[in-house]
Amino acid sequence: TQLLEQSPQFLSIQEGENLTVYCNSSSVFSSLQWYRQEPGEGPVLLVTVVTGGEVKKLKRLTFQFGDARKDSSLHITAAQPGDTGLYLCAGRGSMNYGGSQGNLIFGKGTKLSVKP
Amino acid sequence: ETGVTQSPTHLIKTRGQQVTLRCSSQSGHNTVSWYQQALGQGPQFIFQYYREEENGRGNFPPRFSGLQFPNYSSELNVNALELDDSALYLCASSFLATSAGNTEAFFGQGTRLTVV
């Protein structure tokens, strides 16, 4: 069974601080996606990482895919209150691990609160 | 805005009743996946529909069923509702090319189902 574990589960910081969220698995994923979700809304795709070792930047957000494609991280520089939300990592299921073709496997998420 | 719309946005049902949730996929997409997100958890894959047929299923009982229509919209039906079925139900649309797999998934805003 493919699982994604995210840490930390909760994070409360002051505006201007930096933070890193981790997403780990014992399984290899062909790609990983990061989503941000606000209360009562669906997840919104931030980025997809595909190649082992890949680094992608989206303004103050930096995403990295591990060399072995089993883990990923999201780093936010100078966090702002608008960054508050639930950050989810997700990978495509693989039939090799008993998964179903095409489904996304999600971590439990990291709930980020940035205080002014 | 993703172009994926779900209805209704909120719903309250009594234990034992049946419910139908609806999803309109993004233009150009041919695949709809349904996810259940319990409070404080990441989304869990229910099933995926492609070309009007179920194309993968997660660990959910048969009382969770679905349909996909020729215009690629979809319904999720849940029979004999239980209290634990209370959750945010998300649909996601994507394009599945048999040779290349799924493109990135875009989520609707979800339907909040409360079973009392």
Image (cartoon, coloured by chain):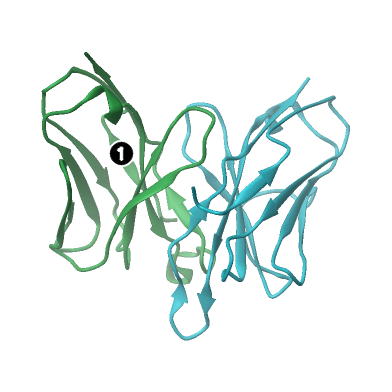
Chain colours: A green, B cyan
Q: Residue at x 29, y 27 (%)?
A: A82
Instruction: Tell me residue A49's x, y (percent).
Output: 26, 61
Q: Which residue is more in the foreground, B46 or B72?
A: B72
Instruction: Tell me residue A77's x, y (percent).
Output: 11, 35
What amino acid is found at the position of numbered circle 1 in the picture?
Answer: Gln
Considering the image in quadrants, where does the C terminus of chain A appear?
top left
Instruction: Tell me residue A90's x, y (percent).
Output: 38, 51
Left or right of residue A3: residue A79: left
Considering the image in quadrants, where does the N terminus of chain A appear?
bottom left
Q: Which residue is mark 1?
A: A6
Above or below, A116 relative to A98: above
Q: Residue at the far right: name it.
A: B17
Q: Which residue is more in the foreground, B51 or B37?
A: B51
Q: Residue at x 43, y 81 (%)?
A: B100
Q: Residue at x 20, y 43 (%)?
A: A74
Q: Residue at x 39, y 43 (%)?
A: A107
Left or right of residue A24: residue A2: right
Q: Which residue is more in the foreground, B41 or B31?
A: B31
Instruction: Tell me residue B56's x, y (percent).
Output: 62, 65
